[in-house]
Amino acid sequence: MDAGGEHFIVNGQKTWTTLGQHADMIFCLVRTNREAKKQEGISFLLVDMKAPGVEVRPIITLDGEHEVNEVFFSDVRVPAENLVGEENKGWTCAKYLLTYERTNIAGVGFSVAALEQLKAIAAKQTKNGRPLAEDPAFAARMARVEIDLENMKTTNLRVIAAVAGGGVPGAESSMLKIRDTEIRQEISSLARRAMGPYARPFVAEALQEGYAGAPVGPAWAASAAAKYFNNRKLSIFGGSNEIQKNIISKMILGL
């Protein structure tokens, strides 16, 4: 904080800020007490993206899209009134918000829609003259992911019911985040496999509206590789799945 106590002075960098190029504000967890323990001495600030010293640099992902960014802060003056909660107590706010973020990242609805699309693709694609859906190995993987998804839907409803009753997601949000991100990755992997050689050539222009070039395989093949690459991030953001396993161990097993 500056000498007058009216502004926090923020310096640092945040990598992987989703859609930050469109944002007006960003919330940041900043260290305001270097003498405190790791998860203490952190404050929750709201920062104006147009403030002097804020720079947004794009990161182009494997699917060719500008979805994420690096954000740099160089002596950014943030009004003290933009502090959320108490100074040095920002991690308490963050932990509460992260449980909801992880439940949202699970994205059960996305998996349901993706599985339906996968089934449609497997019914149209053929192997040895028969629909891919009838291939024993491929059908077994689809069945396994569908069983996992049905289990996840039940767990998701339990979490929603608990929140509706006044509770908050705890270790359950970490469970949802781990399993459903793995399910979504498996579904996108199966869709890519179902495309066979048509999933290999990635022509970014083919994903744009009004594309007039030669088709790259079936209409649904154009986005197969892009979705597969983009979904690799699911098990990382919101706290990597390895971190979620640590949280579950501590909260449930007491390890």
Image (cartoon, rainbow, N blue to C red):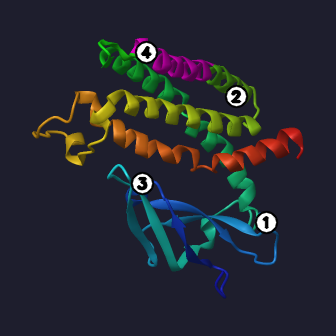
Q: Residues within 10 Å of mark 2 (few under 14, many from 20)?
A: some
Task: Identify the mark at residue 96; answer none if there is no mark.
Answer: none
Find disc 3 in the rendering and name its residue: 19
The front one of 106 and 123 is 123
Confirm whether the magenta stretch covers residue 110: no
Task: Identify the mark at residue 159; answer none if there is no mark.
Answer: 2
Q: CA distance from mark 3 to mark 4?
A: 40 Å
**Which quarter of the image is occupied by the N terminus?**
bottom right
Left or right? Give the position of 124 relative to 24: left
| Residue under the point 27% across and 45% down | 202
**Quarter of image, res 157:** top right
Pointer 1 with pointer 4, Cβ within 8 A: no
Q: Amino acid at mark 4?
A: Asp
Mark 2 or 4: in front is: 4
Assign a secondary structure to mark 1: loop
Whole-percent x and y of residue 163?
A: 71, 30
Q: Amino acid at mark 3?
A: Leu
Whole-percent x and y of residue 222?
A: 27, 36
Q: Main secondary structure of the magenta part?
A: helix
| Mark found first going from the N terminus, 2 or 4 | 4
Q: Is residue 80 visible?
A: yes
Assign a secondary structure to mark 4: loop
Q: Residues within 10 Å of mark 4 (few under 14, many from 20)?
A: some
| Mark found first going from the N terminus, 2 or 1 | 1
Q: Is residue 170 visible?
A: no
Whole-percent x and y of residue 244?
A: 70, 45
Find disc 4 in the rendering and name its residue: 135
Find disc 1 in the rendering and name its residue: 40
